Image: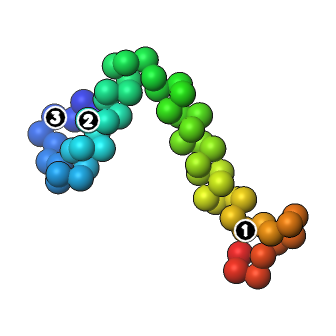
Amino acid sequence: MDITRARWGLEGAEAVLKLRALRSDDCWGGYWLFHLAQEHERIHQTHYLNGALSAGA
C-alpha cells in the first residue's frame, strides 16, 4: 500500500484508506476471515442447490 507516485481514483483511494485503517487498528485478522468467508460463498456455495451442482455453474 506504500506506492510512491501512485494515482488513485476516488473509489480506489477510499478502498485503500479503509484497508489501511483496518491494518492500523489491528482488525486485519477479523476482516480477512470475513473476506475469505464472503469469497467462498460467492465463488463456491452459490453454485450448489441442496447439495447438487446448479445448472448455471
Residue 17's disc is 2
Residue in front for this viewpoint, 33 or 2: 33
57 on left or right of 42: right
User: Can you give x and y, in whole percent of width and height, for residue 29 in the image?
Assistant: 53, 25
User: Can you give x and y, in whole percent of width and height, for residue 14 in the image?
Assistant: 24, 44
Q: Which of marks 3 and 1 is nearer the N terminus?
A: 3
Residue at 46% over, 26% down: 28
Q: Which colour scheme is used?
A: rainbow
Task: Classify 10 Å Cα crowding around label 3: few (below 14), some (14-19), many (20 and above).
Answer: few
Check disc 2 and give the amino acid type: Leu
| Res 18 quadrant in image | top left
Question: Label 1, on which residue?
Answer: 47
- Residue that sits furthest to the bottom in the current view: 55
Check disc 1 and give the amino acid type: His
Residue at 37% over, 18% down: 25
Determine the secondary structure under disc 2. Answer: helix
Location of the N terminus by quadrant is top left
Residue at 23% over, 53% down: 11
Instruction: Give the CA distance from mark 2 to mark 1.
Output: 33 Å
User: Can you give x and y, in whole percent of width and height, for residue 50 in the image?
Assistant: 86, 66
Question: Label 3, on which residue?
Answer: 4
Determine the secondary structure under disc 1. Answer: helix
- Residue that sits furthest to the front in the current view: 50
Residue in front for this viewpoint, 34 or 57: 34
Task: Classify 10 Å Cα crowding around label 2: few (below 14), some (14-19), many (20 and above).
Answer: few
User: Can you give x and y, in whole percent of width and height, for residue 41 in the image?
Assistant: 65, 54
Location of the C terminus by quadrant is bottom right
Instruction: Give the CA distance from mark 3 to mark 1.
Output: 41 Å
Residue at 31% over, 29% down: 20
Position above or below: 25 against 9: above
Q: Are marks 2 and 3 in contact (CB under 8 Å)?
A: no
